[in-house]
Amino acid sequence: MTLTRRDAEHVFQRLRDGLVPERGLDAFAVGIERPRAEIGRLLGMAGDGEGVFKFLRGGYGCGKTFMARLAVLDAQAKGFATSFVVVSDNDLHFHKFDDVYRKVLQELSTSSCPRGALPDIIDRWIAKVEDAVIEGGADETAPDFDARVEERLGEELASLTGGKAPEDLVRVLRAVFQQKQQGNLAEAGALLSWLAGSGNVGAAVKKLAGIKGDIESRDAMDYLHGILEVVKAAGYKGLVIVIDEVETILRMRQDVRGKSLNGIRQIIDAASAFPGLFWVFTGTPEFFDTRRGVAGLQPLHDRIAFLTHGGVASLRQAQLELRPFDKARLRDVALRLRELYPAQDRADVERKATPQVVERLVDEVSDGFRGDVGVVPRQFLRQLVTMLDLIDEGLDAEVVGVDQSSLNENEQLLIENRYPFDPEPGDEQGYAPAALEF
């Protein structure tokens, strides 16, 4: 696969910043064919109307975020809407389903709308409803046409959700249509913001739809179900929600950890009730295997425990293990990036950044970290891109290893074989199952 110049510039700028690119990943996705195929299998199931989930398991630097971003791109290529949410200990707690709902809707995207795709999806759905009303014999120029569309919107949503759609969801969608037909785009946009979980919509705007208050935790998953059905009715195969860096929960207070883990348990227990929805969680072994994490909540651990037989793990179980980088894979990725680099003088880059030079850079990193290149792939790739940049700028570029002073906190903890959190006296107590407002 080749990249457009725009996508290549995006990829290398993100790598310079030590981040995972949001597009163009397929061009240098090396050595992950089998886990990618497993994600593809589950996308097929979701597209056929199943509600499914997967946990991507791997240590820091194993490529969990890369795999999750690639899953999003593969999903969009197959006709899914997607949402990529990074866990924060400030504004995302899994026992507060309104938090989860709000973040998912904020990050809703499609292949044609990279972020904030809810208005576009709603417009597509309404257009299909209008077409259906016209096909049913209605005259779109008749005075009662808009009223017939409004009625059909409510009927279709009730049918899609089995009558379980919240009444306020129906009211808001009808009001959005009304306001747009009247040319009141600001009011329609504010109502869509309310539907996306915003708590900053004024009472006057809410009154237009006959609603009060905001979406609460106990109702949030019903709203998500309604949005899921609208997504599919708009022409998409389904919805893929990625929850990245779920190990962040380990840094939260003990009571919040327990409630958040119970929230995840409740989400996956209800997965089959959301046809066409595919949840993807990424986490470290410490999140899954310690009693501070999943192992401390027995019902959740029983459902998603990582199983091996003779040291071999099936890719089809709840946890999909991603293996660390080794020298061969790091070299292959580096050589592929060398081919993709948007050089001003391609011949000069190829002459100076030879495969032998790339191999020496891998060796430098490997020697600096006791042969464990899986510790610092992010830093290695930054070093590689810096070398290519220097060559492209006409400057001398020496092959050097990664300076340990440049490591971030997680990388330093990994080198020192320490947990990314401070152990607490109650870490071994575990958590009791709890019923949450869902």
Image (tube, grey):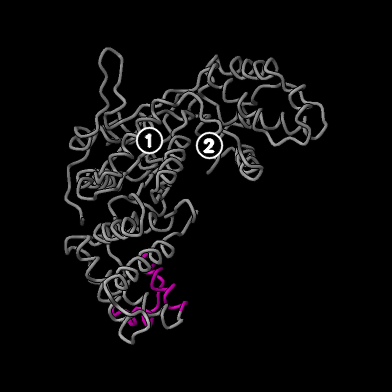
Name which residue lies at 37% across and 69% down: 194
Magenta span contains residue 197: yes
Residue nearer the viewer, 244 or 275: 275
Q: CA distance from mark 2 to mark 1?
A: 20 Å
Name which residue lies at 29% across and 72% down: 133
Q: Position of residue 327 (x, y in %)?
A: 55, 17
Instruction: Please name the residue that numbered disc 1 is placed on.
Output: 283
Q: Position of residue 137 (x, y in %)?
A: 28, 75
Q: Position of residue 238 (x, y in %)?
A: 33, 50
Question: Please, what is the three-letter code of the amino acid marked with disc 1?
Answer: Gly
Magenta residues, as a range? 185-211
Question: Please, what is the three-letter code of the amino acid marked with disc 2?
Answer: Leu
Q: Depth-wise, is mark 2 or mark 1 nearer the camera?
A: 2
| Residue 247 appears left or right of 269 | right
Instruction: Please name the residue that numbered disc 2 is placed on.
Output: 25
| Quadrant housing residue 38 | top left
| Quadrant housing residue 298 | top left
State which tag comes first along the sequence, 2 or 1.
2
Q: Is residue 295 above or below residue 246?
A: above
